[in-house]
Image (cartoon, rainbow, N blue to C red):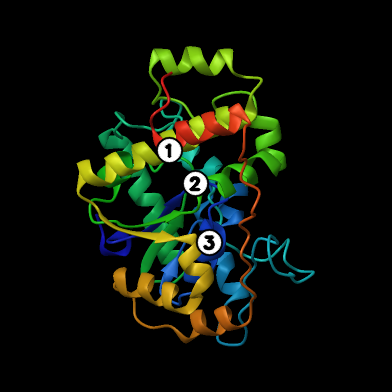
């Protein structure tokens, strides 16, 4: 593997856990290249990465962001910005790997897959004229698979208070459409869990709690099993001390201090998105959610 994809910085965590805001700050670092919204649109076109130089050069720096928490420029739709780029991943990993939805706990890339993936990511770094690779993926951590591809990867694991995360899932359009009444991610459930999920498809809170618990369990197990370099960051700590948290991530990843990161951080507002809406009292479903999240629920 060439130096341009050595020690990539990989941000992992559940969706709606703060991965977007934290990664967007981190990815302002001048040394980092990453898969973009343009790579997502044109997964087979590595040359699209040269487009970044039109937005970031010696004369100006125009980088887009997701319009989740802060106001964005009218140009934001066309600006070059980080993306999870699952179409790109699916293109690289091929039809035998469900990279978007799979836990990939027992899957490894073939030798041909490795060559294709390494070549594509090398081109991302080179065409963007950067020194190191970084990217974000949410849902299953896929650590075993990714370590096979990037043996010396640095992982940043973002976690958020479970009930707040689940409530956020239930309120977003994607989850309403994809995950509310089914197990969205695949490949980590026991037959008993699959049977339980089918019987409880009409209980979205419990189904979401079960999926959240599975994400956390498998991530913790993969971190331990594969002995990866991993820093776990609590969303709540980031909200309380944004600059200190970002600086700790930069130091952990062996990146140099960055005035670009600091300037961007100073120019945005950090909001605590946690809600005090945890179900309490006599609601039996709330009790079952807590038991699932605590790992004591019998499926």
Is residue 42 visible to us here?
Answer: no
The answer for how far apart the CA atoms under marks 2 and 1 are is: 7 Å
Residue 49 is marked as: 3
Is residue 272 positioned above or below 98 on the image?
Answer: below
Q: Residue at x 50, y 56 (%)?
A: 35
In the rendered view, does 210 fall on the left or right side of 229?
right
The nearer-to-camera label among 2 and 3 is 2
- SS for tag 2? loop
Front-lying residue, 253 or 124? 253
Corner quadrant of residue 226 = top left
Residue carrying label 1:
215
For disc 2, the marked residue is 14
Residue extending furthest toward the front: 282
Give neighbour class at mark 2: few <14, some 14-19, many 20+ (Cα, 10 Å). Answer: many
Q: Earlier in the sequence, mark 2 or mark 3?
A: 2
Tag of residue 43: none
**At numbered mark 3, what does the secondary structure look like: helix, strand or loop?**
helix
- Counting residues from the N terminus, which is met first, the one under dot 2 or under dot 1? 2
Q: x, y percentage for residue 13?
A: 45, 49
The answer, for residue 58, to whether it is visible in the render is yes
Residue 141 x %, y %: 39, 43
First in sequence: mark 3 or mark 1?
A: 3
Q: Position of residue 207 (x, y in %)?
A: 56, 27
Left or right side of 80 for 30? left
Where 19 sits versus 106, above or below?
A: below
């Amino acid at each position: 593997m060439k130096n341009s994809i050595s020690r990539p910085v990989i941000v992992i965590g559940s969706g709606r856990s703060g991965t977007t805001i934290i990664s967007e700050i981190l990815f302002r670092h001048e040394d980092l290249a990453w898969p973009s919204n343009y790579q997502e649109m044109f997964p087979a076109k590595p040359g699209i990465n040269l487009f970044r130089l039109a937005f970031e050069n010696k004369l100006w720096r125009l980088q887009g962001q997701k319009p989740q928490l802060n106001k964005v420029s009218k140009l934001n739709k066309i600006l070059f910005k980080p993306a999870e780029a699952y179409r790109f991943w699916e293109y690289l990993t091929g039809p035998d790997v469900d990279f978007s939805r799979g836990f990939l706990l027992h899957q490894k890339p073939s030798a041909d897959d490795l060559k294709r993936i390494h070549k594509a990511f090398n081109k991302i770094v080179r065409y963007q004229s950067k020194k190191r690779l970084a990217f974000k993926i949410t849902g299953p951590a896929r650590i075993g698979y990714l370590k096979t591809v990037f043996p010396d990867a640095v992982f940043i694991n973002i976690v958020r208070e479970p009930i707040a995360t689940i409530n956020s899932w239930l309120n977003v359009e994607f989850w309403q459409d994809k995950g509310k009444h089914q197990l969205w991610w695949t490949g980590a459930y026991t037959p008993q869990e699959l049977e339980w999920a089918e019987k409880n498809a009409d209980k979205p809170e419990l189904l979401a709690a079960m999926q959240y618990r599975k994400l956390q369990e498998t991530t913790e197990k993969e971190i331990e099993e594969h002995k990866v370099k991993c820093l776990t960051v609590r969303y709540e700590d980031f909200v309380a001390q944004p600059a200190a948290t970002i600086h700790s991530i930069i130091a952990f990843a062996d990146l140099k201090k960055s005035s670009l990161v600091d300037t961007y951080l100073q120019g945005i507002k950090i909001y605590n998105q946690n809600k005090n809406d945890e179900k309490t009292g006599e609601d039996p479903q709330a009790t079952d959610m807590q038991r699932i999240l605590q790992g004591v629920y019998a499926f």
